[in-house]
Each structure stands twice: as C-alpha cells, then as structure tokens.
Image (tube, helix red, strand yellow):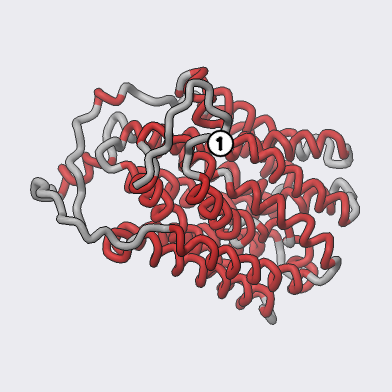
C-alpha cells in the first residue's frame, strides 16, 4: 500500500488518496444526490403527471429511505464476504436500474417501486467505501477522506439541477441521463476499489447475545448519537421532499429559477467536506450544536416568505451546507463511539438518519395535507433546534464493545 507523505502545511485535498476519493465521491454523488434525493427536484412534475396528493407524494418519497435502510442492514452481511469492489458494483447496477425504472414509470405505483429500488443503491454504496478507505488510506488521513467522499451527495444534487434545465419538461429524459451517468461512474469506481480481504481472520472473543449484545450498540454513550441522527433525518425529510414544490406552488418561482434553487443546495453542500476541520477547530459538541441550530433555521425560513427569491436561496444555501456538515459530523462522532468497529457504527448511524427520513417524509405529507406545507416546515425547523440540546457523552463512559465478526 502506498503511504501518503505528511506535509507540514498540506493543501486541502493533499494526501487523502485522490485516486480512491474522487471516484468514491462520484459514486456517492449518483447514489445519493441523483438516485435518492432527485425525487424532490421532480416532485411538481410527478404530482401533475400522476395526479398525486401530498400524502401519497410523502409516502413515495419514504420508499427511497426504506430501500436505503434495507440495504444498509444487508451490507453488514455482504461487505465482509464480497469485499468493497463487488458491493459497489452491485450498488452501481441497482442505481442504474432504479433510475431507468423511474424514467419509464407509467403510473404512481411503478414510480413508488422505482424510488425504493433507487434508494437501495445508496445503502450498498456507503459501507464498502468506508471499508476501502480503512484499507487503502493512512489512518490519520481517513477522517478527511471519508468526509470528502461523503460530500459527494452535494455534487449529485448540484448536477441534477442543470440536467433538469437542459431537458426542459421531459423529466423522463433527465432520469435516463442520470442512469447513464450512474453506469459510467460505476465503471470508473469499481476497478480502483480493493476486493475481498483474503487474509487470515483474527481471533476474536465469542459474540455476545441478548441484552449484552444490545448494550454494545445502545448505551449511554451511543444513545445520544442514534437519537440525534434519527431526529435529524426526520426534520430533513420535509425539505428534500417538498422544498421545490413549495417555492413553485406558493412562491410562484418559474421552472428555471426553481431549478437554480435546487442547485444552490448542492453548491452549498460542498462545504460539508470541511466537517472534519470544523470538529477539530470547535470541538464535536459545539460544532454539532451550531450546525443543528443553523439547519433548523434554514428549514423554518423557507415557508415564511416563499415569494422572496433571495430568502429562498439563503434557506437553500444554509440547508445544503448544514446537511452535509451534519452528516460529516455524525460520521466523526460515529467513529469515536464505535471505535472498535467504525464501519459498522457509521452504517448504523446513517441508517438511523434514513429511518428518520422514512418516517419524516410521509409525516410531512400528512401534516401538509391536513394543515399546510408551511406548518410542516416550521414544525420541522423548531424540532431541529430542540435536537441541538442532545450532545455527545465522553467516550470512556461506555463499556468497550467487542469486535463483531460475521
């Protein structure tokens, strides 16, 4: 393995393994930014073409998060057996197939199934990338590499906007083009990833069961992380699902301006690659609290004056930046509390974000249908600010978990 040299004042991306980080970032971009989150970008078109109510739109959006949760659970089994290369290849093929199915969907039922399939790809993409970083990149660079790969979500969101503008009213052409990009990225990414680890399996203590097994994952140190990630997913769902529809239906934005609104989310999300440095400079509790407060403010701001383009763009920029920053902070927090099994801890934490989103999307649709979309946004933003009261406990407060073997 080539070891990156340590520099006294390294550039932002120096030494973090660009041959692995760049294609990994691209894979996260297509599986998350395109396959998983572009549903919200095209929600007005889906609503009109398939005559869907806010409640049904929320349920369909939840399918992506449900698919992600299922894949995350399965990845813990398949990753050690197949290795990063095979699992990422699987993610790329599922991503491509799911987006083709969206493009060809004749009705809302098929659309719902397609969105679920597309969401599966994201769950199979993240854990093997974490394993690849652990095997290929020097330990002191792994945090930076992981946070930059994680910021690929914002690249995908950014790319989806111009694509939608280019194809105009043909949202089906946009999803077919997303599928083509997914296939190309898969062909780029797979060859640079390591295969299955064929080395000897280290001897480990027997795996505990029952209450002791549960205590490895849920205890006074890990519970705040899991609660915070779930709540963050819950409050973010309303924005990913209904934000563009809000600025179009209530803010009367034209299609090109609303596409730019979506692109602003992606552009601002590039700041998420700095999550590791933010934690280093401010400390984990302060960085987490500030980002949650900013995130809640961004969500609550959008419906206050949806007809103000400047304020809508400010909300989009803050939402995109804080969303990716928070996922990066949760990644760092996960590694700290699950230090004996970091990839499994990251998978669990990100699964809890998706559990929150799977609940939050239909809940937001129900609130929007019963009361108003404005109510759904303001309630979510307020809840997010309350979540900032949940902070990390000292790592040594929890019993040291044993390493889990498959």
Q: Is residue 234 left or right of residue 344?
A: right
Q: Tell me if residue 227 can be seen.
A: no
Residue drawn at (68%, 41%) of the image: 377
Write down the residue under mark 1: 13
Identify the image quadrant of residue 384. Answer: top right
Q: Position of residue 53 (x, y in %)?
A: 71, 64
Number of numbered discs visible in the structure rendering:
1
> Horizontally, is 188 left or right of 260 in the view?
left
Quadrant of the image containing the C terminus: bottom left
Quadrant hosting residue 139: top left
**Residue visible at 87% across and 39% down?**
309
Residue at x-position 22% and y-position 44%: 214
Q: Position of residue 88 (x, y in %)?
A: 44, 63
Q: Is residue 277 above or below residue 190?
A: above
Say whether residue 3 is visible.
yes
Above or below: residue 103 compared with residue 231: below
As helix, strand or loop, the secondary structure at mark 1 comes to: loop
In terms of image quadrants, where is residue 5? top left
> Residue 212 versus residue 363: which sits nearer the camera?
212
Classify 10 Å Cα crowding around label 1: few (below 14), some (14-19), many (20 and above): some
Q: Residue at x 25, y 38 (%)?
A: 340
User: Considering depth in this image, is 406 or 293 the residue closer to the camera?
Assistant: 406
Residue 50 screen position, x and y as percent: 74, 73
**45 left or right of 255 in image:** left
Q: Where residue 327 appears, x then y in whole percent?
A: 51, 39
């Amino acid at each position: 393995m080539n070891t990156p040299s340590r520099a006294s004042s390294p550039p932002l991306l120096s030494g973090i393994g660009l041959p692995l980080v760049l294609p990994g970032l691209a894979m996260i971009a297509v599986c998350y930014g395109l396959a998983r989150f572009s549903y919200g970008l095209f929600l007005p078109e889906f609503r009109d073409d398939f005559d869907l109510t806010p409640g049904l739109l929320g349920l369909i959006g939840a399918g992506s998060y449900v698919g992600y949760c299922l894949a995350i659970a399965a990845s813990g089994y398949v990753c050690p057996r197949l290795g990063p290369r095979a699992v990422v290849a699987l993610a790329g093929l599922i991503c491509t197939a799911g987006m083709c199915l969206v493009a060809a969907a004749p009705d809302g039922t098929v659309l719902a199934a397609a969105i679920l399939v597309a969401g599966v790809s994201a769950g199979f993409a993240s854990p093997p990338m974490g394993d690849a970083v652990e095997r290929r990149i020097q330990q002191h660079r792994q945090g930076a590499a992981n946070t930059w790969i994680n910021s690929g979500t914002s690249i995908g969101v950014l790319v989806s906007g111009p694509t939608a503008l280019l194809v105009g009213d043909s949202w089906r052409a946009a999803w077919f083009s997303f599928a083509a990009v997914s296939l190309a990225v898969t062909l780029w990414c797979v060859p640079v990833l390591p295969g299955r680890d064929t080395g000897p399996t280290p001897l480990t203590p027997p795996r505990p069961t029952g209450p002791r097994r549960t205590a490895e994952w849920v205890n006074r140190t890990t519970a705040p992380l899991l609660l915070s990630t779930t709540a963050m997913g819950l409050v973010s769902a309303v924005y990913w699902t209904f934000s563009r529809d809000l600025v179009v239906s209530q803010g009367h934005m034209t299609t090109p301006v609303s596409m730019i609104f979506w692109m602003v989310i992606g552009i601002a999300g590039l700041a998420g690659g700095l999550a590791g440095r933010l934690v280093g400079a401010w400390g984990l509790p302060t960085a987490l609290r500030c980002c949650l407060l900013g995130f809640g403010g961004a969500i609550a701001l959008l419906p206050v004056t949806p007809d103000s383009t400047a304020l809508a763009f400010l909300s989009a920029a803050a939402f995109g930046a804080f969303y990716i920053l928070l996922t990066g902070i949760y990644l760092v927090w996960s590694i700290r509390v699950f230090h004996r099994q970091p990839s499994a801890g990251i998978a669990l934490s990100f699964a809890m974000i998706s559990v929150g989103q799977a609940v939050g999307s239909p809940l937001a649709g129900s609130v929007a249908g019963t009361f108003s979309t404005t109510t759904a946004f303001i309630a979510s933003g307020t809840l997010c600010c309350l979540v900032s009261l949940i902070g990390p406990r000292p790592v040594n407060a929890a019993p040291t978990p044993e390493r889990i073997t498959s």
